[in-house]
Amino acid sequence: MTDSDKSNTEVMAQEISEPTASNGSGTKMTAEEITLAVEALVFSSPQPLPSQKITAALNKVGLTAIKNAIAALNESYQADGRSFRIRQVGGGYQYYVLPEYTEYVKRLFSRERKLRLTKAALETLAIIAYKQPISKNQIEYIRGVACDGVIGNLLEKNLVKISGRSDGVGRSLLYSATNEFLKFFGLNTFDDLPKIAEIDDLIGMMEAESQTDNAEAAEGETVADLLEANALEDEKSAEPALSEQESND
């Protein structure tokens, strides 16, 4: 095989493994055109935009080209001092505001209703996220309390979904976390969830800090009590002298 044949074979293999995008006229898109097109698609999407949809919109552009376009855009935003970037969250790409500018955005949307979760909701949501798919009976067994209302609220908020039925007796409904859950907690995939061991370490650190804070607070209260007691003793010891002086006057 000649060098020319090898070169042609390599090009063909590259084209098969990494499809290239084309515009409406069938002309191959340049890297700059792909970058601008990706920017337009992500900017116009109200939800995190999966790379598969970008591929479909750009006539099967390769995943590597998409990642290169995102990297180029973020480098450009950083160089220009922009207050936003593109990141992967909820299984897709989405614009986000840098942390140092989020306070201004909060002020703008401060009147909007915020999604708040109770402790019971957070516990139930954590169980579903780590054990999914999981039935209501299993959730209640772990929590030790009924959770019909909590699951209903999580379904309404689109943080969990019904993902099927179990194979056991009664064919119980199974629940899983949603992409909205990933967006709410700023995760890209469920693999980004903290590991159980990491959570145990964090809880241990928090408990140790809490014990230290309680000890320091108790010590502070003891010191304050002693100071107050000393002040009262000083006042009592000064009263006879003051009374004697008043009688002499």
Image (cartoon, rainbow, N blue to C red):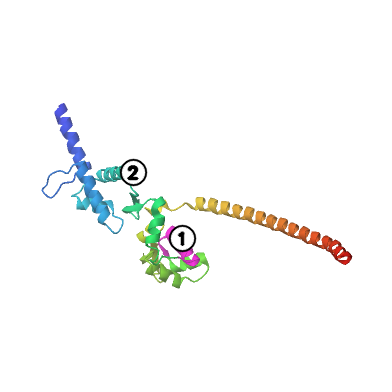
Q: Is residue 38 left or right of residue 128?
A: left
Q: Quadrant of the N terminus?
A: top left
Instruction: Tell me which residue sits at (16%, 27%) in the image.
Output: 3
Q: Give the amino acid at mark 2.
A: Gln
Residue placed furthest toward the left:
25
Question: Residue 187: where, in percent of width, then height?
Answer: 39, 54
Sequence-wise first label, 2 or 1: 2
Q: Quadrant of the C terminus?
A: bottom right
Q: Is residue 42 left or right of residue 158?
A: left
Q: Is residue 61 above or below residue 9?
A: below
- What secondary structure is found at the residue carrying circle 2? helix
Q: Nearer the viewer, residue 249 or 94?
A: 249
> Is disc 2 surrounded by few (<14), some (14 to 19) or many (20+) residues within 10 Å?
few
Q: Nearer the viewer, residue 13 or 225?
A: 225
Q: Quick check: is 131 in the magenta stretch?
A: yes
Kindly identify which residue carries mark 2: 78
> Is disc 1 surrounded by few (<14), some (14 to 19) or many (20+) residues within 10 Å?
some
Kindly identify which residue carries mark 1: 126
Instruction: Tell me which residue sits at (24%, 49%) in the image.
Output: 38
Q: Is residue 135 above or below residue 32?
A: below
- Which secondary structure is most common in the magenta stretch? helix
Question: Residue 214: where, in percent of width, then height?
Answer: 64, 56
Q: Nearer the viewer, residue 46 or 103?
A: 103
Q: Select label 2 or label 1 by which is in front.
A: 2
Q: Give the amino acid at mark 1.
A: Ala
Which stretch did the figure color magenta?
117-134
Q: Is residue 21 left or right of residue 103?
A: left
Residue placed furthest toward the front:
249
